[in-house]
Image (cartoon, grey):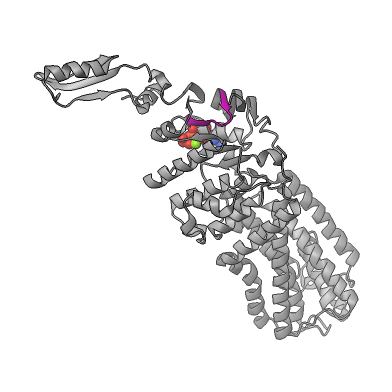
Amino acid sequence: MTTPALPSTARIGLSRGALELKGYFRETSAVVFTLAMPVILMLIFGSIFKGEVGHTGVDFRQYFAAGIIASGIMSTTFVSLGVSIAQERDDGTLKRLYGTPMPKAAYFIGKTISALVLSLLETLLLFVLGNVLFGLKPPSTPERWLTFAWVFVAGVAVCTLLGIAISSVPRSGRGAAAVLNLPYLVLQFISGVYFTFGDLPSGVRQVGAIFPLKWMCQGLRSALLPDTLLAAEPAHAWEHGRTGLVLAAWGVAGLALCMTTFRWKRRRDG
Amino acid sequence: MNETAVRVRGLRKRYGDVDAVNGVDLDIFRGEVFALLGPNGAGKSTTVEILEGHRRRTGGDVSVLGVDPGKPTREWRARLGIVLQTSNEQPELSVREIVRHFAGYYPRPRDVDEVIEAVGLTEKAGARLALLSGGQRRRVDVALGIVGGPELLFLDEPTTGFDPDARRQFWKLIEGLAHGGTTILLTTHYLDEAETLADRVGVIVGGRVVEVGSPMELGGRANATARVGWLGPQGRQSIETDSPTQVVAELSQKFDGEVPELTVARPTLEDVYLAMIGADR
Ligand SMILES: Nc1ncnc2c1ncn2[C@@H]1O[C@H](COP(=O)(O)OP(=O)(O)OP(=O)(O)O)[C@@H](O)[C@H]1O
Ligand SMILES: [Mg+2]
């Protein structure tokens, strides 16, 4: 008896990505909480905030728009993935998959594809709104486009890995949203989304600078906002090298966490 | 037919300080339908999930299709079908979408519509799982278990929640699979199900296999004496006999035709099963 070859990991990964997206868009609550939430926040705060960042000539609402784009990426990757994986562990989806010949990697490829697509969509949505409402401009030079691209990709990659890793923390699927939203909310306040990073007390800044969101915000500002803003940045520089290093370090840590802590079973599954 | 599909020796599984499975020996032959019976908490699911590679064993030797389930590979998984005792997921997808998706995991999947038909969900093929009834949901589980065309199929209480008609339909499906050469290990609390489907039955109590045999032979059922009962002049009477036909003939002569309230009974599978698990009757 000759055994036909097993379907390739790439093919199954793609088909999982398609399935994830299909399921996601049919579940209204997920769409509202991850995709629509940053949009709603942008609209609310955008109508409250006003004024200029220091004396840089940059509208604070544009500064905020760049930050909320970074935070939107974190929402569609970290929060959305962490919650969905915790739920899938709880409802037995992971256990069922574990019992099939699906390659383990295909599951993560599927998650990454859906996270990437949702992040692109979210970024586009927030950018267009920022443009229409606050006059946010697209990157002005090819270099800035490049910056935008790598910060986006690195941000998605890091937050995806961390979302997968943290999914093992909540004890149940129901508690997952709370566990995931706590770090997300706190980071938004200390990373330069709702407040100008330079205006935060230096202790808070130091804590914020440990985590990826601060660097994603800063990276996106460097791609979307004029250099006059540097006067208001604590480092007076865009620090691309440091941004890359911090994100890479978190990426490596996230990957290591995923590989060592990922569980296909509930705790009670023996 | 004497090739073994599943071989288990001295299997043990400990949860904390409880021995849920305590020295199970089991041989399941290729092409056989084997039913595992036992009261709640006897260790059926634990045993089956160890064979499926879902749980780690504490001790003993296990071989499933020649592979140690503690070291599963994709190739091995492609030869198995698994229906777990509980599952409840992917509510947003339709029956056809999910069955088609799972078919894509296997090297030689069965036809998707044929599988949906086989589990009796053709009319619901386009419906989202969230909208199915409990029994219909369970049939999706069965569909996902068989879509890969498994050599060996594990079914942990597959018909729980099925209406009587669905259960008959499911039996036909299993008989068809068995006829096609699929080896099947199922657990069930329905003795009629075990009796109809299984070539052999194993009874597990308190983590140990207490007996294995064909449903007809289990607990000495085949050799058990029959009990003939009737309504005599002084009330209900009965005798145990090895030749019930003769007793009935004699009674018929004595009563000159119809014997009042005649019954002839042998112990049912349920009788021997309940005796075996030590239940009071
Ligand atoms: N993950 C676990 N942790 C601790 N104890 C467990 C675990 N899983 C099962 N047990 C215990 O092991 C014993 C056997 O459980 P198992 O699920 O195998 O029984 P079963 O025969 O399948 O019962 P049922 O007919 O109710 O499905 C039970 O006493 C159960 O409480
Ligand atoms: Mg069970």
Residue shown at 87% from the left, 71% from the top: A146
Q: Point out the residue furthest to the left here.
A: B233
Image: magenta residue range:
B25-36
The answer to whether any part of residue A174 appears in the image is: no
Say which residue appears at 75% left-offset and 51% top-offset.
A8
Residue B31 counted in the magenta span: yes
Residue A166 in the image, given as x and y percentages of width and height: 69, 52
Q: Is the magenta stretch mostly helix, strand or loop?
A: strand
The count of marks equals 0
Left or right, A243 with respect to B234, comes to right
Q: Position of residue A1 (x, y in %)?
A: 70, 37
Work out whether residue B206 or residue B147 is closer to the camera in this orientation and state it. B147
**Within the image, what quadrant is residue A239 found in?**
bottom right
Image location of residue A198, percent across then percent down: 80, 72
Residue A8 visible in image:
yes
**Quadrant of the image containing the C terminus of chain A:** top right
Residue B260 picture quarter: top left
On screen, residue B261 versus residue B40, left or right, reads left
Q: In this orientation, which residue lies closer to the viewer: A4 or A46?
A: A4
Q: Looking at the picture, does residue B101 appear above or below residue A54?
A: above
Front residue of B177 and B145: B177
Residue A21 in the image: state x and y as whole percent. Answer: 65, 63
Q: Which residue is drawn at 84% across and 67% down?
A: A150
Q: Is residue B43 magenta?
A: no
